[in-house]
Image: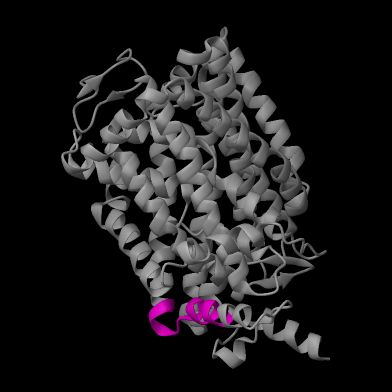
Amino acid sequence: MESIINAINDVVWSPWLVWLCLATGLFFSILTRFMQLRHFKEMISLLFARNESPEGISSFQALVVALSGRVGMGNIAGVAAAIGFGGPSAVFWMWVMAFLGASTAYVESTLGQIYKVNDKGQYRGGPAYYFEKFFGGGFGKAYGLLVALAFVVSCGLFLPGVQANGVVKAVTGITGEGAMVSTAFGDVGTNTLIVTLVVVVLLGLIIFGGIKRIARVAEFIVPFMALGYILMAVLIILFNFDKIPTVFGLIMSDIFNPMAGFGAAIGWGVKRGVYSNEAGQGTGPHHAAAAEVQHPAQQGIVQAFSVYIDTLFVCSATAFMILMTGMYNVQGTLPEGQFLVQFVDPATTISGPAFTQMAVSSVFGGFGSVFVAVAVFFFSFTTIMAYYYIAEVNMAYLTRSFKSDFALFLVKLIIILAVAYGAVNSAGYIWTIGDIGVGLTAWLNIIGMLAIFFMAKPTLLALKDYEQQKKAGVTNYTFDPAKLGIRNATFWEEKLKNKKD
């Protein structure tokens, strides 16, 4: 089974996808005239616009729901894996992916807003919706169905297990697995079962409350835990202040002669960058579409900022803690058990939160492991919530012709089972399954976005329109898609018509 999964992952995450992610980010950065730099101040101001409505959530809530999907195991265990397999220079490529990916996040999230729909009093949108509405006809519907199915499988089945597995490993790394008992999944420790049960019960209570409840929970947990985690990193950096030049030197000097090889460094940096900040993956537009805004470009600008928070702040915090304390090994492309650099026990799992826990513990003792375990629990839990919402939106798209409540219930059941399976599974291929899910949706979304851009450039038109209104000193923005030559943006056409009436 593991060899088959690895073979599929090698195809999905071939070097072509790595270069496609980087090239797409550079392409959109140039065409938007590096909006991620020009509109940095605007990103901050738009965050706190109170524009919630009965149908949609606020820009800030949409941001934190998106961040709840972005800030997860990728920030703690994913960064450790990038360093462990790609060497210190993998961190640099994560930064590059974040900077370029911010423009990609703008494009996909603005598309989500432009082509969103009001589905029974709830805003829905995402790649499936904008591909169908833009391309239209048989091809648009077929591609929309394919994309929606990919997201249901990826976010409902493949990705939740990674987060749940990380939660269990972080907690049982402190408590131990407990007495082993026989289950349908094999022999599992009692502590593992208890943590799994807690996660499953809490998840069930929240996801049955819909996007409003998910947004309220994420609005409280995500900022609190992200700030707490970054504060912990800042303290460790202050305690090791004299090592800052050394760490920067280690990251930057390794770019030109990567100890793990150029392919491994850039491959792991980009892969973990995309896994963590999700730029181009197509998950962000689902949350962006749920926001109530005056102009589609506003939420695209806000979502671009979420990439910065995820990678430049949270991922960098993890990387600096690990590199400053020297709590890592670098395996590169060598056979398992052989290391290019070995600073800790060779039995330490690379693709888990162990490096991060060891780094914090080296400064704060036993409290460090507990703190990281708590951070992993909340980060991963909110990510699972975000995955559920994405799976639900795409299942609603697939079943919209017959409005099946059972289908939406089935999504809840599937994700709960996926979480339970991932939590108790000890196999190393759980992360690989997650990578397949990320790569699958990234291929479909990026290719479709590029096709849209070459055919009509709706997101560039929206950005230019927003900038012109802002320059004119407008306080209440409007969006007239027909005037801009954007077709099938029915939600905004109806909104403008109702406003005039």
323 relative position to 143: left or right: left
Q: Is residue 74 visible?
A: no
Q: Quarter holding the C terminus?
A: bottom right
Q: Position of residue 47 (x, y in %)?
A: 66, 57
Provide the major secondary structure of the magenta segment: helix
Residue 458 lies in magenta, yes or no?
A: yes
Q: Quarter holding the N terminus?
A: top left
State which quadrant residue 198 falls in. top right
As drawn, 12 above or below 168: below
| Residue at the spot 42% in from the left edge and 58% down from the top edge | 101
Nearest to the observer: residue 452 or residue 479: 479
Q: Position of residue 319 (x, y in %)?
A: 40, 33
As drawn, 414 above or below 405: above
Q: Residue furthest top?
A: 179
| Residue at the spot 47% in from the left edge and 71% down from the top edge | 143
398 relative position to 431: left or right: right
145 relative position to 261: left or right: right
Give the magenta part as a residue range.
452-465
Q: Residue furthest front?
A: 242
| Residue at the spot 77% in from the left edge and 48% down from the top edge | 213
